[in-house]
Image (cartoon, helix red, strand yellow):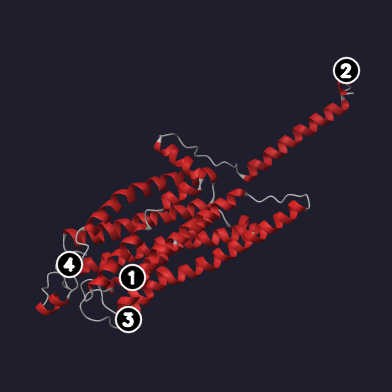
């Protein structure tokens, strides 16, 4: 980001003409301060989020918190690989003067963590869509064990999708125009991190909103006819949380996607200081997305605020599920029904005393 050695290969000196054509970073050390602050705030906040979500997942046995746990863990990995290793260590400390194999390997891990952070939100969106539009199906297919298997598949695919970016070119330091490999990698990148997930979010969130509007109209009709339609408020809060997370992602990642495509077709980051500045600011906005979910959860979810309060006050968590197992529940119901039926039969057989008869009458 700052005006350091700008060689394509670490340790290799640039020629004089390339150094003169290279764009300067007008932000100077502001990115270093920004990313250091973001790392110092974001990692502890995400760890706190991880502990609170784990308590809620154990307590409620809901697949929702499993997806949120995966999203938070992926955000922590993104902060560690992209901000700490990729920017602060490689760029700010070592000035990219490290072996090429290490640079490319870290770049591959950065993209993998980035893809995992974004795509962990997709199964959460699908889960909320099924819960609202197909509630009976949701009760059958949505449970923590299945959610963990889905997250394992998503993380494996995210790790595999980062392998091609081993050959990603450093936009700040590569002076030549993007070639066919750069074009393919850039389009693959923006499709994986923005266009494809945003299309999924847009379609499913639109269907969720239409479903909620339809349910609200049905409730109004039922209220006018004197009946009430039970609509769980918890679904509304969960949907609000989902819409907030996906909307913030779409807003914060849009500038970076636009600047990357502008670099590909119009003007290079290496040669134009204005594109360089826009790319720096866009990256700063995009990385902010890894630290804002905690505040969104606190704003929307009362159970999450309670779990965070318990963690901060070192209160013990109830680590047993709120609902018992099905067979225990059925057995309890059977025993309760048998006791109540025996009590009813005893009351029918036993005659009432005169005093009780007077009270009964």
Q: Quarter-wise, where is residue 162 in the image?
A: bottom left
Question: Is 208 placed left or right of 153 in the picture?
Answer: right
Q: Is residue 155 visible?
A: no
N-terminal of the two: label 3 or label 2? 3
The foreground one among 348 and 285 is 285
* Viewer-nearest of discs 3 and 1: 3
Disc 1 on helix, strand or loop? helix
Q: Position of residue 120 (x, y in %)?
A: 45, 60
N-terminal of the two: label 1 or label 4? 4
Dividing the image into 4 quarters, which one contains the N terminus? bottom left
Question: Is 141 placed left or right of 7 in the picture?
Answer: right
Q: Residues within 10 Å of mark 1 (few under 14, many from 20)?
A: some
Q: Residues within 10 Å of mark 3 (few under 14, many from 20)?
A: few
Q: CA distance from mark 3 to mark 1?
A: 25 Å
Q: Residue at x 74, y 56 (%)?
A: 221
Q: Position of residue 154 (x, y in %)?
A: 44, 63
Question: Is 119 placed left or right of 94 in the picture?
Answer: right
N-terminal of the two: label 4 or label 3? 4
> Which of the labelled discs sits on residue 163, or is there none?
1
Q: Residue at x 56, y 58 (%)?
A: 128
> Which of the labelled discs sits on residue 265, or is there none?
3
> Which of the labelled discs sits on residue 99, or is there none?
4
Residue at the outermost top position: 355
Disc 2 on helix, strand or loop? loop
Residue 141 lies, with reference to residue 310, above or below; the image says below
> Which of the labelled discs sits on residue 353, or is there none?
2
Q: CA distance from mark 4 to mark 3?
A: 30 Å
């Amino acid at each position: 980001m700052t005006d350091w050695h700008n060689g394509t290969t670490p340790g290799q000196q640039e020629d004089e003409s390339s150094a003169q054509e290279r764009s300067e970073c007008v932000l100077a050390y502001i990115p270093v301060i920004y990313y250091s602050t973001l790392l110092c705030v974001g990692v502890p906040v995400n760890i706190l989020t991880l502990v609170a979500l784990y308590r809620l997942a154990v307590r409620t046995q809901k697949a929702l918190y499993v997806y949120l746990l995966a999203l938070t863990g992926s955000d922590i990995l993104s902060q560690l690989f992209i901000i700490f290793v990729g920017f602060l260590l490689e760029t700010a400390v070592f000035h990219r003067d490290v072996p090429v194999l290490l640079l490319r390997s870290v770049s591959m891990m950065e993209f993998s963590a980035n893809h995992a952070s974004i795509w962990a939100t997709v199964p959460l969106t699908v889960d909320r869509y099924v819960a609202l539009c197909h509630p009976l199906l949701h009760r059958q297919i949505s449970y923590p064990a299945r959610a963990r298997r889905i997250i394992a598949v998503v993380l494996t695919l995210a790790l595999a999708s980062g392998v091609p970016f081993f050959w990603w070119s450093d936009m700040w330091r590569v002076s030549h125009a993007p070639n066919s490999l750069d074009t393919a990698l850039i389009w693959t990148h923006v499709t994986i991190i923005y266009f494809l997930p945003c299309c999924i979010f847009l379609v499913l969130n639109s269907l969720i909103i239409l479903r909620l509007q339809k349910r609200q109209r049905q409730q109004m009709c039922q209220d006018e006819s004197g009946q009430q339609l039970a609509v769980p408020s918890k679904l509304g809060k969960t949907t609000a949380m989902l819409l907030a997370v996906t909307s913030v992602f779409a807003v914060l990642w849009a500038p970076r996607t636009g600047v990357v495509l502008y670099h590909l077709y119009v003007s290079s980051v290496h040669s134009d200081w204005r594109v360089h500045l826009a790319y720096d600011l866009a990256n700063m906005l995009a990385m902010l997305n890894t630290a804002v979910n905690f505040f969104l959860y606190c704003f929307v979810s009362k159970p999450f605020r309670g779990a965070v309060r318990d963690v901060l006050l070192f209160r013990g968590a109830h680590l047993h599920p709120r609902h018992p197992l099905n067979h225990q529940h059925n057995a309890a119901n059977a025993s309760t029904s048998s006791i109540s039926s025996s009590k009813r039969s005893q009351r029918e057989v036993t005659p009432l005393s005169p005093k009780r008869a007077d009270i009964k009458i």
